[in-house]
């Protein structure tokens, strides 16, 4: 497996596929079925270029995990203009998804480590939120040094859902 930076609009299709399949597997029972069923693994060509440009912003990084030339996971970390629960001086892990066929293969850990290594030296902590009922994600982050730091209600795919906030001091 290789973990590398997002390099081209061609990567966007792989990210979309991983995101959709991970959502369907991880959020079943937490997010309405209609939302999960509406997700698509396809990305229109005109959308791929725009999404690539959005993700290549200067205040963050996107990393992809490849296995046999296939994207099997990705992570996005930001340290400017993050979510409102991320304090000044902290960075936010806004996305970390792994294809369900590769859960527990070390891909999530490799992506997280690469994201941590990419943070500016003056970063105080890495902060994220997970759906409150997503026990798999909460266990993953807890085993990697994150601690529960609060909760809030957030919008996911048009639905208001309870989330748990996790923080790892650096």
Image (cartoon, rainbow, N blue to C red):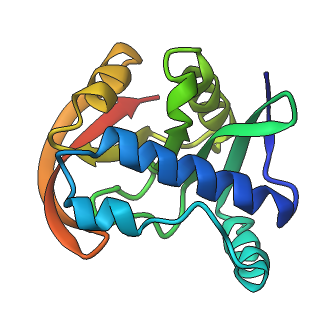
| Nearer the observer, 48 or 119 | 48
What's the residue at 38%, 48% (across, down)? 24
What's the residue at 62%, 31% (across, down)? 111
| Nearer the observer, 6 or 39 | 39
What's the residue at 37%, 39% (across, down)? 25
Q: How far across and down, in percent of the image, does residue 153 sit?
A: 13, 62
Number of numbered discs present? Answer: 0
| Nearer the observer, 74 or 71 | 71
Residue 75 shows in this picture: yes
Residue 127 shows in this picture: no
Q: Is residue 104 above or below residue 159?
A: above
Q: How far across and down, in percent of the image, does residue 97 sit?
A: 51, 41
Q: How far across and down, in percent of the image, does residue 84 sit?
A: 30, 66
Q: Name the quadrant containing residue 114.
A: top right
Which quarter shows the N terminus?
Answer: top right
Q: Name the quadrant containing residue 161.
A: bottom left
User: In the picture provided, is 90 more to the left or to the right than 50?
Assistant: left
Q: Name the quadrant containing residue 117.
A: top right
What's the residue at 39%, 69% (across, down)? 38
User: In the picture provided, is 130 more to the left or to the right than 63?
Assistant: left
């Amino acid at each position: 497996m290789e973990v590398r930076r997002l390099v081209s609009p061609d990567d966007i299709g792989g990210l979309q596929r991983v995101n959709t399949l991970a959502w369907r597997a991880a959020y079943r029972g937490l997010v309405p079925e209609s939302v999960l069923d509406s997700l698509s693994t396809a990305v229109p060509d005109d959308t791929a270029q725009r999404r690539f440009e959005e993700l290549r912003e200067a205040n963050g990084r996107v990393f992809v995990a490849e296995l046999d030339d296939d994207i099997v996971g990705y992570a996005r970390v930001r340290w400017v203009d993050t979510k409102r629960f991320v304090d000044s001086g902290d960075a936010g892990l806004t996305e970390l998804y792994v294809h369900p066929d590769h859960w527990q293969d070390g891909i999530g850990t490799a992506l997280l480590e690469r994201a941590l290594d990419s943070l500016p030296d003056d970063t105080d902590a890495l902060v994220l939120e997970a759906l409150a009922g997503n026990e798999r994600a909460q266990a993953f982050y807890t085993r990697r040094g994150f601690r529960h730091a609060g909760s809030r209600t957030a919008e996911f795919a048009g639905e208001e859902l309870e989330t748990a906030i996790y923080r790892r001091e650096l």
